[in-house]
């Protein structure tokens, strides 16, 4: 069978990915796969298997540590799914945004695996960033009006229609930023579970107004450090951890900590299922609720209006939040987190699944918040996004005795 050429399909966040996958599998859009046995390497497939695990109480796919998909990290899930698909010996594999949630080494491992597979298995890649297109794929299409159009030059995929955030971000209604530094202080922090040490001797400070990126490969302890900062990890009680001027274990509640933190992650997006408007979603940030159940004050309404102007969304403020693209949803949730100007804004893998246009918008807004507010920003990602400008980076390096960390200049 002629396995050439492999195909990449470049899409935006506004594309109907489910419809595209259906047309590929049917052979209506890519004739090479018609009648062949295929596999789908995608978060869509992962979610399907997790739902089956919940329904039937057992799991067919195990990670390398013999855990179920539901109780494994996103990176472990991807590796387990690819191994499962390959074991079924498909004629072709549709690979969808393969690099999300993976550190640099895991990305290289997956690329090497797919390169070897490409010698005998047809690869169809769905991608929303030019830099992620696999090097062995030479036939690249973009999705336009549900049709695939051949791209003769990658430069044809330049970002278009980029919006600039030209209006200054609004001031907070109540100045709750503390007058102490640091906001977060770790001194020789070590966290272990049983005989396994996750992080060892971490010393780190985050001061008011600083912009940090937390880096480290899968399993290096990034999530552990975040859980110590947000108050969700009881291990902090036995460590020299100070949060917002209060030594951990001095009587503060988890909610005292959380109300000083704005938080955004891709997992958080899954929790918003109500049909709230864009404007109400931003306003709900004043009350830390999912949905608006209280009437905002006139001052709060004015701040929401100003944020809508910043985002260029005032004219569509009554549209359902869920009608927005993935990237624009995240812009709204950032505004929601910032209406009270929290001392600390945490962005946990916030650019996963975004296309290049939305990444550019996201980066521009975060840079703007960093330069126009006293809110400290902690950005957690495997990627060093082009255009995003953190002041500092904290790098975790895995070790069998526990990951160590050090500050590096951004």
Image (cartoon, rainbow, N blue to C red):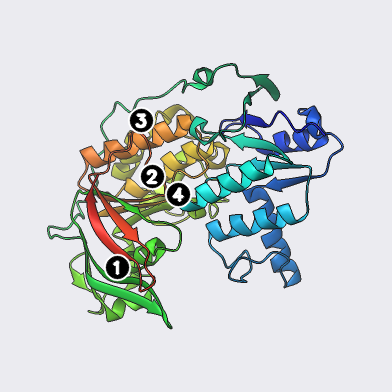
Nearer the N terminus, badge 4 or badge 1? 4
Label 2 belongs to which residue? 334
- Residue 286 can be seen in this image: yes
In the picture, the quarter occupied by the N terminus is top right
Residue, far bottom: 194
Alpha carbons under labels 1 and 2: distance apart: 20 Å
Label 3 belongs to which residue? 309
Nearer the N terminus, badge 1 or badge 3? 1
Depth-wise, is mark 3 or mark 4 nearer the camera? 4
Left or right of 9, for residue 380: left
Badge 3 element: helix
Nearer the N terminus, badge 1 or badge 2? 1
Pointer 4 with pointer 2, Cβ within 8 A:
no
Alpha carbons under labels 1 and 3: distance apart: 31 Å
Taking depth in this image into account, of 238 and 199 the one nearest to the observer is: 199
Taking depth in this image into account, of 77 and 283 the one nearest to the observer is: 77
Badge 4 element: helix
Q: Is residue 308 above or below residue 194?
A: above
Give the image location of residue 103, x and y in percent: 46, 52
Left or right of 16, for residue 307: left
Pointer 3 with pointer 4, Cβ within 8 A:
no
Alpha carbons under labels 4 and 1: distance apart: 36 Å
Residue 104's label in the rendered image is 4
């Amino acid at each position: 069978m002629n396995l050439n050429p492999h195909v990449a399909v470049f899409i935006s966040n506004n594309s109907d990915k489910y419809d595209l996958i259906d047309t590929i599998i049917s052979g209506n859009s890519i004739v090479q796969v018609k009648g062949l046995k295929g596999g789908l390497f995608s978060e869509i497939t992962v979610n399907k298997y997790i739902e089956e695990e919940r329904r039937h109480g057992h799991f067919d796919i195990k990670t390398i540590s013999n855990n179920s998909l539901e109780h494994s990290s996103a990176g472990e899930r991807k590796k387990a799914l690819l191994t499962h698909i390959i074991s079924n010996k498909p004629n072709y594999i549709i690979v969808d945004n393969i690099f999300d949630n993976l550190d640099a080494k895991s990305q290289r491992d997956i690329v090497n695996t797919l390169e070897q597979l490409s010698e005998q298995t047809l690869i169809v890649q769905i991608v929303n960033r030019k830099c992620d297109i696999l090097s062995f794929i030479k036939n690249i299409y973009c999705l336009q009006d549900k049709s695939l159009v051949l791209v003769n030059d990658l430069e044809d995929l330049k970002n278009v229609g980029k919006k600039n955030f030209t209006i200054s971000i609004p001031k907070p209604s109540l100045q709750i930023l503390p007058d102490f530094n640091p906001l977060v202080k770790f001194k020789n922090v070590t966290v272990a579970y049983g005989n396994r040490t996750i992080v060892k001797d971490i010393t780190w400070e985050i001061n008011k107004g600083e912009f940090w990126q937390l880096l480290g490969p899968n399993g290096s302890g990034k999530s552990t450090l975040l859980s110590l900062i947000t108050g969700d990890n009881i291990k902090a009680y036995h460590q020299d951890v100070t949060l917002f001027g209060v030594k951990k274990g001095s009587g503060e509640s988890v909610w005292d900590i959380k109300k000083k933190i704005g938080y955004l992650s891709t997992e958080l997006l899954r929790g918003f299922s109500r049909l709230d408007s864009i404007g109400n979603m931003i306003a709900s940030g004043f009350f830390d609720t999912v949905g608006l159940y209280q009437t905002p004050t006139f001052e709060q309404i004015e701040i929401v209006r100003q944020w809508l102007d910043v985002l260029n969304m005032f004219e569509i403020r009554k549209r359902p939040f869920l009608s927005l693209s993935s990237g624009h949803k995240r812009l709204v949730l950032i505004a929601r987190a910032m209406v009270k100007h929290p001392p600390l804004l945490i962005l946990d893998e916030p650019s996963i699944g975004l296309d290049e246009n939305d990444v550019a918008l996201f980066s521009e807004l975060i840079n703007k918040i960093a330069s126009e507010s006293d809110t400290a920003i902690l950005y957690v990602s495997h990627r060093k996004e082009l255009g995003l400008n953190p002041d500092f980076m904290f790098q975790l390096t895995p070790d069998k005795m526990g990951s160590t960390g050090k500050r590096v200049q951004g």
